[in-house]
Amino acid sequence: MLKIGNVVAKNKVVLAPMAGVCNPAFRLIAKEFGCGIVCAEMVSDKAILHGNKRTLEMLFVDEREKPLSLQIFGGDKETLVEAAKVVDQHTDADIIDINMGCPVPKVTKCDAGARWLLDPGKIEEMVSAVVQSVSKPVTVKMRIGWDDEHVYAVRNAQAVQNAGGSAVSVHGRTRVQMYTGKANWDIIKEVKESVSIPVIGNGDIFTPEDAKRMLDHTGVDGVMIGRGALGNPWMLYRTVHYLTDGELLPEPTPQEKIRIAILHMDRLAALKGEHVAVKEMRKHMAWYLKGLQGAARIKDVIMELTERDKMVSILENYVSTLDDKPVESGPEEEVVYH
């Protein structure tokens, strides 16, 4: 069990907030696959305050996906606080998460995301201002540091705690690393030992065994799975089951992968319309198809499609030619996740 403020999750597995991925369609699948907490993709504080249609859609929470953490980012205290108030008072989110890990330049140049990692004092000031202005638990997702010379993970986590933050998630890479190299679990362990609030470990968790190793090595209260769940929500329920019962369930069959991929697309179409959904699903389909025999040819065809029925027809015809043996999964390619 994982408890964040007054929010109790039924297990220790958390879906990471991934840009362009963690919309309600995918989050609901993650929840159905047993995830304890799901996180929405990050939203700009200024976009929330401007209230445009696309941003308001990103704040939508389906009752079935709770408990849910909604992530915001910004570099200005006043607008961050006002955006947090909107999330607090006008959404069904259970937790307000502040991003201080996003490494992309368009975010860091606004003094947001990973830029905060260089200034523990700013972290305490900003998080404290948000905590005092909202009633929902406030958490932070961060990286271990900006670069190898500026690894302030322990001080930054302590700043979150001092500010009244209810938990901190730590991705074991620096901003400079982006998504390359290896995640440093030793520093996550140091963070866990330095604070009393819950710590969630993130980075290089691609199998249920990885999740168990993370928990054993660092002592964290929860594990956050990002890229390992792309096109592979089975990773979530297999991890929950493994951590609970010590049993490693089999990987999904090709037929099961395609069934869930189509469900994912149909839910996305219900949210965004068929045209937008099919375009967005192209990248997801590439992830769902990963590891399947002859998938490269099908991926090339799918990337040109704009109609739901055509995509379904091609996928079902393709999978009918495969046997029903489980599909081995592995580390995913880079995706911008926060």
Image (cartoon, helix red, strand yellow):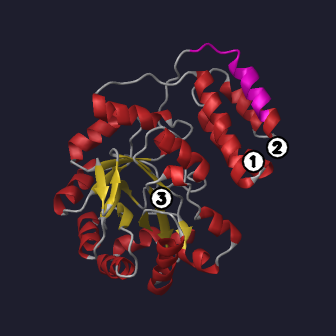
Residue 203 % position (x, y): 38, 48
- The residues tagged by marks 3 and 1 sit, at their Cα atoms, a distance apart of 22 Å
* Cβ–Cβ under 8 Å for marks 2 and 3: no
Residue at point 34%, 36% (across, down): 210
Is 22 or 113 nearer to us in this picture?
A: 22
User: Which amino acid type corresponds to the residue marked 1 in the rendered image?
Assistant: Lys
Residue labelled with disc 2: 306
Task: State whether residue 113 appears in this view.
Answer: yes
Q: Is residue 14 left or right of residue 310?
A: left
Q: CA distance from mark 2 to mark 3?
A: 29 Å
Q: Residue at x 39, y 81 (%)?
A: 133
Label 3 environment density (alpha carbons within 10 Å; few <14, some 14–19, many ≥20): many
Identified by mark 2, the residue type is Thr
Q: Which residue is at 52% across, 76% downward?
A: 86
Return the x and y of residue 87 as percentages of the image width and height.
Answer: 50, 71
> Residues under labels 2 and 1: Cα distance?
6 Å
Tell me the element at label 2: loop
Query: Which of label 2 and label 3 is nearer to you?
Result: 2
Range of residues picked out in magenta: 311-324
Q: Residue furthest bottom?
A: 78
Magenta-span inclusion, residue 78? no
